[in-house]
Amino acid sequence: MFEAAELGHVIDKKTFKEEVTRLRADLLEAQFELREKCGFPVIILISGVDGAGKSETIHDLYDWMDPRYLSTQTFTDPSDEESERPFMWRYWQALPPKGWIYVFSGSWYSLPIARRISGEIDQALFDQRIDQFNRFEAMLANEGALVLKFWFHLSREGQKRRLRSLEKDPRTAWRVTKESWERLKTYGQLQEVASHLLRMTNTPWAPWIVVEGTDDRYRSLTVGKMVLDALQQRLAEQHERHYPVAPPITHKIDTLDVLTALDLTQQIEKPKYELRLARAQGRLSELARSPEFKKHSLVLAFEGQDAAGKGGSIRRLVAALDARQYQIVPVAAPTEEERAQPYLWRFWRRIPRNGRITIFDRTWYGRVLVERVEGFCSEADWLRAYAEINDFEHELSADGVIIVKFWLQISKEEQLRRFKEREQIAFKRYKITDEDWRNREKWDAYHRAVCDMVDRTSTGAAPWTLIEAEDKNFARVKVLETVCERLEEVLQVVSPAAAEAAPEEKIVRKTDEKKDKKQ
């Protein structure tokens, strides 16, 4: 795969100077147009063998372009905070906003390559990472990002000569370390791993460009021209690119679906409600303080019909928790900063570290609900969102995040009753807006969107729990008990409160059964 990068390309000094004069002017013009339009972000990955000129090329890009709108992102071993979050978390934090160019010196590829060479991960896990990166870069491309990936190559002898040359020069000797020479010993392994990785991640939306690193002028000029060509081509395009990643929606021919199948008549009488609520809160409190929970984090996602009782359920839930342990994130329309980033960026940045809990009041599912129904995004955007959301939740779950998702459902008649009640109660009036009344007119459209959402995103790692919320007592207890059951399942522990409650719960069930028989 690297043969074309071992031919000995050389650019003479005169030609280089003439080419760079034109290149600098064109790069600055393209960069200015990018800033003016703010239409898309640019991500440039600089990877390759030691001594192939990665840092020199980055320096040249800063010299040729306006450095105020360039930023270099460098990644070494993960910090403690980064290690307690999903693998991709720190890379999401480093994504550029629209109109900016970010150069990644080291990227999401660096650590898996190093760990594969050292034998810390096997081929199967390495290939899982590769699949993850392909989906991530497809998402970036569909969100409008221009992704350019450069791999700087040297032959084994070329790398050895390069390191010796750098070591002799006092101005560059500091760049050659003991680790540089140690990595030269694993040159063959690097070529094998890198060849496999480049072949598997060389996609239409984020292709690899292999550059020979022997001659400084050839290398830098090649990268500069490739960046310029890609920028000019994207700036000249009249419409956005979309890579299809989801099958179309198929409509059902009858009225039976996951929402109409719910029994909204279920209730819990107040005495029983207070008993079960207290027990569930006790269980949750114990589970959140469990030593096993310190190896995980918890994400609770609340969606539901307007006035279905999300806020009340959340308040009963956090009453069982230490306020220092959780954060509630109310999700509204994205800010200007958030609109300049990929859709899921604002949710990735809120993912808790181990031992912590984040509760989302409205979630990333807004794209396939309100944005779909109201036309705030294109059909291509919300169709591909199902796969991107599943990927997002799979990545969280694979790295120890426990995800519990709730949809709270009420009838259209009950929603109307609650809307009118809110208008009559002073401290509840703030909850009802013109937007709520307008959304009622699209009840059927939202109903279809919710059913599609559940069908396409209820997975083994992050299943949906549908809450019959016509009776608030029933909904609040079911939410709490579901969280407890999910935590006990993952942590493989049973809280003392749950063990103590079991016999009494049986008595309650028997009493209910006797009542049913008498009726």
Image (tube, rainbow, N blue to C red):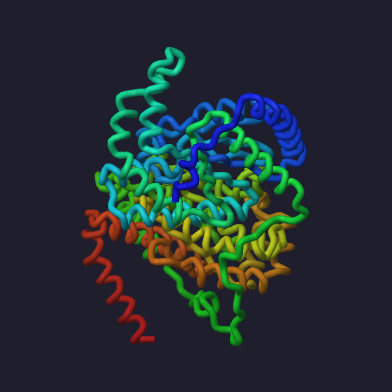
Residue 35 vertical position relative to residue 357 in the rendered view, above or below: above
Q: Nearer the viewer, residue 190 or 440?
A: 190
Residue ID at (55%, 33%) = 10
Q: Report the label total.
A: 0
| x and y percentages locating residue 373 in the rendered image | 68, 65
Q: Nearer the viewer, residue 257 or 384?
A: 384
Residue located farthest toward the top when viewing the structure as drawn: 170
> What residue appears at the point 67 percent right and 57 percent down from the top-left corner?
241
Q: Residue at x 30, y 71 (%)?
A: 508
Q: Residue at x 57, y 29 (%)?
A: 217
Give the answer, above or below, for where 424 lies relative to 120.
below
Q: Answer left or right for 100 relative to 500.
A: right
Could one spot residue 76 in this view of the protein? yes
Left or right relative to 377: residue 194: left
The quadrant where residue 337 appears: top right
Q: Nearer the viewer, residue 344 or 487?
A: 344
Q: Can residue 349 be seen in this snapshot?
A: no
Residue 324 quadrant: top left
Residue 13 position in % (x across, y down): 62, 24
Quadrant for the C terminus, please: bottom left
The quarter holding residue 384 reads bottom right
Whole-percent x and y of residue 12?
60, 28
Point out residue 356 in the picture as x, y percentages from the top left corner. 38, 43
- Position of 69 with respect to 489 (left or right) is right
Q: Say above or below: 147 vs 460.
A: above
